[in-house]
Amino acid sequence: MTGSSFVYVTFIRTTPDKLWSALTTPEFIKKYWFNIQHETDWKVGSPWKMVYPDGRITDTGEIAEFDPPKRLAIKWRNEFMPELKAEGWSRCVMDIEQVEDVVKLTVTHTMELENAKFIGAVSGGWPKILSNLKSLLETGEVVLKEIR
């Protein structure tokens, strides 16, 4: 594959249905995504956006795939950093798979642009977000209160 990509795999003590719900329920998403709101109706072709608590839009896109509880894909573009927005659209795919008594979550974020700064940026953010998600599902608490 040409372009840029970031892949993160984690194993979570939960069920595919609970993980799917955690990935698609706006109020739950805010708990592990540093209070950022995700707005969409979760239907293929529908608009999607992330909004800071102060109302600024951080990212936009559309739902590309929606196959509960197995796969979610989002066409994704950064909106608040001009140099990242200028790089264009990326694609984020979240694959869920039962592996024995745990669930494997694979997040693959790709962009057709070589050495994309956007992929560099998400490679720093995804581990924090997904660590919070895993901890929240397993213990009821996040590990990080704010993204830095």
Image (cartoon, helix red, strand yellow):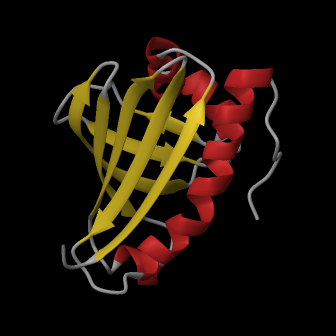
Q: Is residue 135 left or right of residue 111?
A: right
Q: Position of residue 61 (x, y in %)?
A: 30, 50
As displayed, is residue 2 above or below residue 133?
below
Quadrant where the C terminus is found in the figure: bottom right
Q: Residue at x 50, y 48 (%)?
A: 9
Q: How many marks?
A: 0
Q: Residue at x 68, y 23 (%)?
A: 137
As displayed, is residue 110 above or below residue 66?
below
Q: Position of residue 108 (x, y in %)?
A: 37, 54
Quadrant where the N terminus is found in the figure: bottom left
The foreground one among 111 and 98 is 98
Q: Position of residue 11 (x, y in %)?
A: 57, 35
Q: Is residue 28 left or right of residue 139?
A: left
The foreground one among 9 and 61 is 9
- Asked if one can make out residue 32 in the rendered structure from this viewpoint, the answer is yes
Q: Residue at x 44, y 34 (%)?
A: 39
Q: Position of residue 52 (x, y in %)?
A: 62, 49
As displayed, is residue 122 above or below residue 82?
above
Q: Hey, which quadrant is residue 96 in on the image?
A: top left
Q: Is residue 28 left or right of residue 44?
A: right
Residue found at the very far front of the displayed protein: 100
